[in-house]
Amino acid sequence: MTDQSNKKLIVIAGPTAIGKTELAIRVALHFKTEVLSADSRQFYREMSIGTAKPSLEELRAVKHHFIDSLSITENYSAGDFEDQGLNILADIFSKNDYAVLAGGSGLFIKAITEGFDELPKADAEVRNKLNQILAEQGIGVLQQQLKELDPEYYRQADIHNPQRIIRALEVSLSTGKPFSSLHLKKKRERPFSVVKIGLNADRDLLYQRINHRVDLMVEAGLIDEVKQLLPYRHLNALNTVGYSEIFSYLDGEISLQEALDAIKQNTRRFAKRQLTWFRKDPDIKWFKPDEQEAILEYIH
């Protein structure tokens, strides 16, 4: 393996709509390097508008990895991301001293920077039962069960992602221990160093950015994108803010305005959970989105 002891991985984290993509491209251009996306929904080819993927111009400006790398029909875990991401980083570091990892999925950032223990295999019968509950009673029942069994993971997790909830519950129910207690306690040593940048803003400004982004998504054709995905709505990938609410609108359960209001509200809640996760990391140096020059100085 190439010696990576003098290599630096620049992590750009923060809540949704805060400006991570813009900063990642600025940093990657500055260091003439590439970006790995740590946004677990931007992996999927079929989901573009509702996941706020980088534009074609942005993708042309800097090489991105893990954008459009999967289909919504494929299963993919943080462990898979760890394995593939480390291989990509080894390739980047063979020709560059810097690489950028940017996104709002704390679990996937953790996979690259710290790694995970091999979690015990869960009972298939338990998993099947949880999937049956999801299909027959909905995600709310599973969310409540997770809140009772593992309140720590419930506070951190993307509770609108049934795959994450079921994984946590199946491990907890199979082992008798909270899923959060089985996470790696000691960081795995990486052959490169890590510089962590966090982006945040005043709550009012962040909420304005979120609301504006939802409006732009609708203008860009979000409704039509979701219509095309109706045959696949049962898949875990589509149990996502921005898609679930439009499905409800298309089913006639709520008006379009109610759906858009719900997307904005649920996205704000998601941003709060992201911040809860990232604020626990003492290695993150926080900046405002407009402090790009200061961020570059800090990295240097």
Image: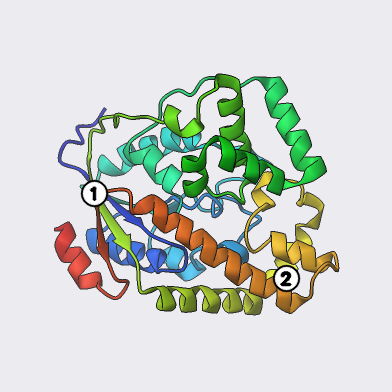
Name the foreground residue: 235 vs 141.
141
Q: CA distance from mark 2 to mark 1?
A: 40 Å
Residue 151 left/right relative to 228: left
**Few, some or many C-alpha atoms within 10 Å of disc 2 (few <14, some 14-19, many ≥20)?**
many
Quarter occupied by the N terminus: top left
Q: Which residue is mark 1?
A: 283
Where residue 281 sits in the image (x, y, percent)? 30, 48
Q: Is residue 289 visible?
A: yes
Where residue 203 sits in the image (x, y, percent)? 41, 73
At label 1, the amino acid type is Asp
Where residue 166 sits in the image (x, y, percent)? 63, 36
Name the foreground residue: 21 vs 251.
251
Name the foreground residue: 14 vs 159.
159
Image point 44% across, 43% down: which residue? 107
Looking at the image, is 166 positioned above or below residue 296?
above
At label 2, the amino acid type is Ile
**For the residues bearing labels 2 and 1, Cβ distance under 8 angstroms:** no
Label 1: state its secondary structure. loop
On the image, which quarter does residue 175 sit in? top right
Label 2: state its secondary structure. helix
Q: Which residue is mark 2?
A: 223
Where residue 236 sits in the image (x, y, percent)? 68, 45
Residue 163 left/right relative to 294: right
